[in-house]
Amino acid sequence: MPAGRGEYKEIFMNHKRPPIPAIVLLILVLAFSIYFIVTQSQGEQDDTLTASGTIEATQVNISPEMAGKVKEVLVGEGDSIKAGDPLLSLDDSLLTAQRAVASAAVDSAKAALVSAQTKYDQTLQSALAAQEAQRDKDWRVSAPIEFDQPMWYFSQAEQIASAQTEVTNAKAALDAALANLDKVITDLNNAEYIKAEKRLADARAAFLIADQIKIQTENVTENGGLVDAAYDYYNATEDELEAAQNEFNSLLGTKADEDIQYARGQVLVYQQRYDAAYKRLLSLQTGAESPAVVAAMNALDQAKAALVQAESNLALIDTQMAKLTIYAPIDGVVLARNVEPGEFVQPGATVFSTADLGSITITVYVPEDRYGEISLGQLAAVTVDSFPGVTFTAEVIHIADQAEFTPRNVQTVEGRSSTVYAIKLKVTNSEGKLKIGMPADVTFK
């Protein structure tokens, strides 16, 4: 039979309520558990080192080395390029014409060299034949009694060297004699003697002319008054010659006479010495040493030098023509194109900006108290807003040696006043998704 209302009341009255201290203790335990879980979660989250930066890449600006008019532009902005790909070409019409002239000059220089070589060979052959005949003659020549060795004792080169020395010495002696004669002539103590010399020289010159005229007029059949006039002139010059000779003779035996005649004799002797020495030097220069062979050799050397110069000019033009085409220096992407066909460009002007997007970097700044957590080669995850849910792998490639203040683009004053270290990472971008200037977040592993 179901219990009545009174029974329920009895059961309820018999069940006691928990004491208040127990309830308070239970609440405290629950609160502490929740606090511990939350703080642990926040601690784990705070231990993860993150930083932000901007995607970067090494840009290569491309400039022409030659000035010229743009003939063709082969790439545009955003195009992928490989190292060595042609990017731009300049007009080559002027250099093409110059190359034709330079090429003709090379051909002419080659022909001149062949001619010079042939002439040298012929001249040398003739000189050697003449030398052989002269050698046979020289071997039969007896040496002066003052020589203990035969004439052939010294080689041709040795004899030429000695003969050249004698020519040099003779020239020096002649120069000294001429200087001494000039000194004696300008000496005031010898002025009277020099005046008498000059008078005698002039009188002799006039007499020779007068004598010649006298002989010419005597051979004229109808000479009329020619003979009388010629004889009058002749007699006058003869009288002047006699007077000049007497004046000069009166000074013979004086110190001036001795000094001047000795000085004149020195000049004459040393002039003869020089002439004889030079003549002997030429006589020894036979065969390969003969002047004709030496001249032919010089002409051959000049022809060789002319060919080298012509070939150098041609090579220079070829080098300039090669620089009319600009090639890509790296694998990458064209970031900017600053030129169009028909424009005139100057050397050094940037016509393209390129970058290798397969090898990009990002620089982030880590607080000084977290600096020790970073090491070279450490991996990190990079994310960008443009590709939600996509993570790119990065590797630490550089850690700054010195601390610095946070760059000014940090938003808060507190952040900008913090001391940080720059960390540079290389980001894997094999698919080329990341672009220069993209903001990115880095989470270090």
Image: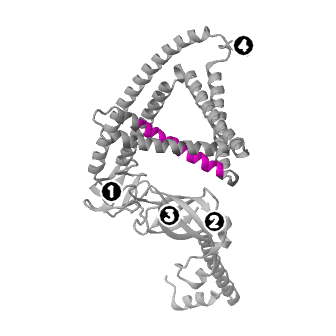
Whole-percent x, y for residue 92 in the image: 29, 50
Whole-percent x, y for residue 179 in the image: 65, 45
Q: CA distance from mark 3 to mark 4?
A: 107 Å
Q: Nearer the viewer, mark 4 or mark 2?
A: 4
Picture disc at residue 272: none
Quarter where residue 234 is shown: top left
CB within 8 Å, label 2 to label 3: no
Q: Nearer the viewer, mark 4 or mark 1?
A: 4
Mark closest to the chain's N terminus, 3 or 4: 4
Quadrant for the C terminus in the image: bottom right
Colour logic: one colour
Mark 3 secondary-structure assignment: strand
The residue lying at 64 percent from left, 34 percent from top is 270
Q: Nearer the viewer, mark 3 or mark 4?
A: 4
Q: CA distance from mark 4 to mark 1?
A: 97 Å
The residue lying at 55 percent from left, 79 percent from top is 408
Instruction: Give, as a three-letter code, the residue at label 1.
Output: Asp
> Which residue is labeled 3 in the image?
382
The residue lying at 56 percent from left, 42 percent from top is 242
Mark closest to the chain's N terminus, 3 or 1: 1
Q: Residues within 10 Å of mark 1 (few under 14, many from 20)?
A: few
Q: Point out the stretch of residues depicted in magenta.
A: 192-212
Q: Is 77 above or below relative to 39?
A: above
Picture disc at residue 145: 4
